[in-house]
Amino acid sequence: MRELEMKFTKQYEEYMRGREKNGLKKVGLKKLKKILKRCRREFRPQYQHQKKEGGEEENEKPVWFRGESSSLHQCPNHCTVCDGTFFPSLLEEMSEVVGYFNQRAQKLLELHLASGFRRFVIWLGSKVSRNHEELIQEGKDLVTYAIINSIAMRKILKKYDKIHDSKQGQTFRSNARSMHIDILQSPWLCELMAFYINLKENKPDENMMPGLFDACSLSFENAKPMLSCGLFASMNLDIDLTCSICLETVFDPVSLTCGHIFCYMCCCSAASVTIVDGLKSAESKEKCPLCRREGVYEGAVHLDELNILLSRSCPGYWAQRLQTERVERIRQAKEHWEQQCRAFIGV
């Protein structure tokens, strides 16, 4: 197990080396491991001695676990090594990694989906002319970047829990999701996986790192749509593309800020808004149908690449659903404008 962990750390450092000069953000695995190593070496024996003498007392949870902000983040046993060092550093690095990934992915997808004059303007602004193969490579690199950083965060938090005999690393991950800094929850990761499938060529990727990245794929096993990507150490990232509201393959998909994906019309219905008003008009108290978090609609992202991928993969279903939704959209638009007219003339 230790050899596998050391192997990943080495592979992570090799992957990031040479990419930092391009502005890539990363998790400081070596720095965080040194903090934990010092904690285990200098302070763990003191904790065990205190437990034997006075019995183990339940410590108050760190301030940040209660959803409050503080400059001092305390770990279990009020560790003087980790307090204000480990979690703040990891939180900052996670935020930088997710922010960088979202920004790069959004620009790449905007370039791919743009057309006409807007596409010309974006190409001029990028200052670099990129062909079809280069776009595929950049998409693959960003997916790999997201995956390997997610694994790095998971491993260092698991190591923290092992050293401190706690579950605060797991709790940190849960809170990271609510703070939208879990990179696997990013809607742009799902979009990039769909983008990669939409653009990739049949020839194998010669520059792919062995054992780190397997090609993304879309499957319909047992009529269940699944977007998958192979990860390091034979793990898989699977994204279920079934709308939990209509229980069908997501149509005109949209991702809420909590990371859950629904059909756009189903999402509008759940948020108590019409398709004319849109999700941004949803009240902040409206909750996600799955996780029940509030305020998840305003920052919803339309998954255009996924929409293209699904429309090509199941054309029969797509045509049928398109016809059904066209009728409903016309009905809602008609009701909306009739209501606006009545309001205008004071009826």
Image (tube, grey):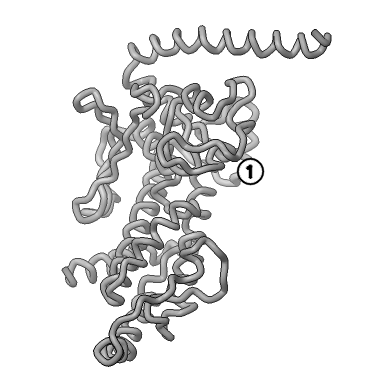
Taking the spot 63% from the left edge, 40% from the top edge, the residue there is 124
Q: Position of residue 266 (x, y in %)?
A: 47, 24
Taking the spot 39% from the left edge, 52% from the top edge, the residue there is 146
Q: How many marks?
A: 1
Taking the spot 32% from the left edge, 64% from the top edge, the residue there is 12
Q: Provide the residue designation for mark 1.
A: 125
The residue closer to the viewer here, 106 or 156, is 156
Name the side, left or right, on which 265 lies relative to 214.
Answer: right
Residue that lies at the very extreme toward the right in this rendered image? 345
Name the side, left or right, on which 306 lies relative to 230.
Answer: right
Task: Kindly state the secondary structure of the residue where label 1 is placed.
Answer: helix
The residue closer to the viewer here, 110 or 206, is 110
The residue closer to the viewer here, 129 or 260, is 260
Q: Position of residue 260 (x, y in %)?
A: 42, 38
10 Å neighbourhood of mark 1: few (<14), some, or many (≥20)? few
In this rendering, is residue 226 above or below 106? Answer: above
In this rendering, is residue 86 above or below 301? Answer: below
Name the side, left or right, on which 264 lies relative to 76.
Answer: right
What type is the residue that disc 1 sits on? Gly
Name the side, left or right, on which 1 lies relative to 49.
Answer: left
Q: Is residue 110 visible?
A: no
Q: Is residue 213 visible?
A: yes
Quarter of the image that includes the N terminus: bottom left
The residue closer to the viewer here, 343 or 25, is 343
Q: Position of residue 115 (x, y in %)?
A: 57, 27
Q: Position of residue 248 (x, y in %)?
A: 34, 22
Taking the spot 32% from the left edge, 21% from the top edge, the residue there is 313
Quarter of the image that includes the C terminus: top right
